[in-house]
Amino acid sequence: VAENKAKIIFAEGNFWGRTLAAISSSNDPSSYKGFGPYMPGFELVPYNDIIALEKALQDKNVAAFMVEPIQGEAGVVVPDEGYLSKVRELCTAYNVLFIADEIQTGLARTGKMLACDHENVKPDILILGKALSGGVLPVSAVLANDDVMMNIKPGEHGSTYGGN
């Protein structure tokens, strides 16, 4: 990926929140309309569309693909059987990080510990939330192996409350 040219591909119909970066990756009119200018480098492909994803991943500047294994905000949208396995295969083939947002589906909400477990798929980065505290506290987690996580050294990148 060329410096300052990185792109992240997102599945349409997503909802990550209402911060500038989150809405930049969305196509939800209630979150998106009137909030620009948006972050560059974010592109959308239709959810559950392997052909569109593969076409997008052919761009050498794509660094990651982020998807909810089962979409929650767009309704309960379950992908075709094999979708997540194919996503994993494509991300591996194109050397792109596979990011699974399991904030709504993770921690045994779909009959397995993770929605990705239904296809025995392991994303490179896993995002959890909500169920971590049973909805009592605003807790979330970003999980990945050392090869991914240690690209950002401790103290190198964070937020005001991130060190507390």
Image (tube, helix red, strand yellow):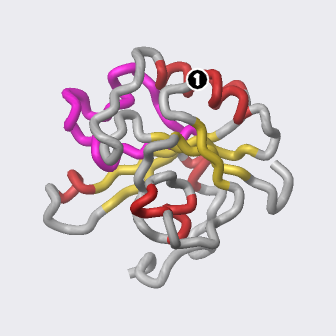
Q: Vertically, is 16 above or below 14? A: below
Asked if residue 86 lies left or right of residue 77, the reply is right
Q: Vertically, is 106 above or below 84? A: below
Residue 19: horizontal and vertical position, in percent?
47, 70
Asked if residue 69 lies left or right of residue 62, the reply is left
Residue situated in front as seen by the camera: 154 or 141: 141
- Image quadrant in which the C terminus is located: bottom left
Q: Vertically, is 11 above or below 42? A: above
Residue situated in front as seen by the camera: 77 or 142: 77
Identify the residue at image location x=24%, y=41%: 107
Q: How many C-alpha atoms fall within 10 Å of the one at disc 1: few (<14), some, or many (≥20)? A: some
**Residue named by callout 1:** 50
Asked if residue 2 lies left or right of residue 7, the reply is right
Residue 162: horizontal and vertical position, in percent?
44, 76
| Residue occupying the far top of the picture | 81
Q: Amino acid at mark 1?
A: Ile
Q: Which residues are magenta?
A: 98-124
Dot 1 lies on which element? Answer: helix
Q: Is residue 90 magenta?
A: no
Q: Is residue 113 magenta?
A: yes
Identify the residue at image location x=47%, y=84%: 160
| Residue occupying the far right of the picture | 2
Residue situated in front as seen by the camera: 35 or 22: 35
Residue 86: horizontal and vertical position, in percent?
55, 20
Asked if residue 19 lies left or right of residue 134, the reply is right
Identify the residue at image location x=31%, y=43%: 72
